[in-house]
Amino acid sequence: MNGMAGVLRRGEMRDVMEKYVRPEKNPGTACSGCGLRLAHRKVLEAIDELGLGLGDVVWGTGIGCSGRQTFVTWKGDTFAGTHGRVYAMATGLRLALPPEKRLILTVGDGDAFTIGFLHLLNCARRNVDMTVVVFDNLGYQSTGGQYGVTTPLGSRTDSSPYGAWEPNWTQGGFDVLRILKEAGATFLARHTVLQGHEPVESLKRAIRNRGLSLVQLIYPCVTHYGAQALGTRDLAKIYDWFRDRTVESIDADSSDSFTTGIFHDAVGSRPEFAASMREFVASVQKEGNHG
């Protein structure tokens, strides 16, 4: 049965890719064995299970590995923003598009938590209706494997040959999701791509939310992080390393693990930005007409 289930599952994945992804972009640009393809498919699974079609979603992409893997792959409407600017573009689109259109952004950890962080925080402050999916490969892998703000402490990388030592957004009592919660985001979750269907369920909840949702998907980079930080490009060893450090509790100690689950669910607790803007404009127009 397990073998047959595996065959059926692979068939489902092929169907999802063929249904939503342009043929010339399938299977994508990710390195052999990279977890990024799994992350991409998780988003497509969530869209499919929600019953959304090509005309229901506008897909935006950032830069780096995540941007290349998902850039213009969606058969429907797509756009791209460089160096953290995709959130500002998406905010404009949210105001211009009908409310029923779903905005999904696939970005990297650098695009989300460093160069684009201020734009992202402002989207959270405004509670702009969009789903941000952060494909986190634990560093700047597309430029050679430098350490970033989610790189585990002690990791040897291209720019930290003696081990990453400076504080990051995920260890030592810090959590970037806590900052986004305080900024006003209304749905936040973190998973690894190796957790089966659980990430898909969180992505579905994120997409349904009428506000700022963010799901951080951590995935294994074989070419750089595996080779440099773990000393191997053996897929089994790299994936086992990730599984061993995945904890299915968002409140657990994150000093040497990936804490996963739904971090914050405040769906419906705050007004959505575009809806508030329309109400405000209508009130101004009404007041002007009376004057």
Image (tube, rainbow, N blue to C red):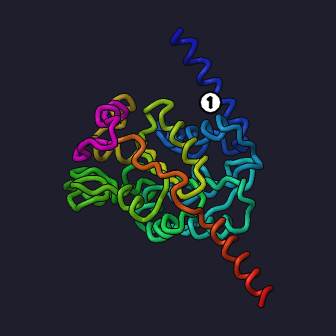
Q: Which residue is mark 1?
A: 13
Q: Could you say where residue 150 lies in the image, as x and y percent from the top left?
A: 34, 54
Q: Where residue 290 sits in the image (x, y, percent)?
A: 78, 86
Can residue 83 be seen? no
* Residue 202, position as x, y percentages in the image: 51, 41
Taking depth in this image into account, of 65 and 224 the one nearest to the observer is: 65
Name the kind of residue labelled 1 in the image: Met
Q: Is residue 114 left or right of residue 187?
A: left
Q: Which portion, as a residue range, is magenta?
A: 239-259
Counting other residues with Cα less than 10 Å from the Cα at mark 1, is it few (<14), some (14-19), or many (20 or more)? some
Q: Which quarter of the figure is the C terminus placed in?
A: bottom right
Quadrant housing the N terminus? top right
- In the rendered image, the vertical position of residue 82 relative to residue 132, given as above or below: below
Front residue of 18/85: it is 85
Q: From the viewer's perspective, is residue 31 above or below residue 180?
A: above
Camera sees residue 55: yes
Question: Which residue extends farthest top?
Answer: 1
x and y, in percent, of residue 177 in the image: 38, 55
Q: Residue at x 74, y 55 (%)?
A: 77
Labels in figure, total: 1
Label 1: state its secondary structure: helix
Left or right of residue 226: residue 281:
right
Residue, x 59% and y 17% (percent of image)?
A: 7
Q: Is residue 5 magenta?
A: no
| Vertical comparison of 176 with 237: above or below | below
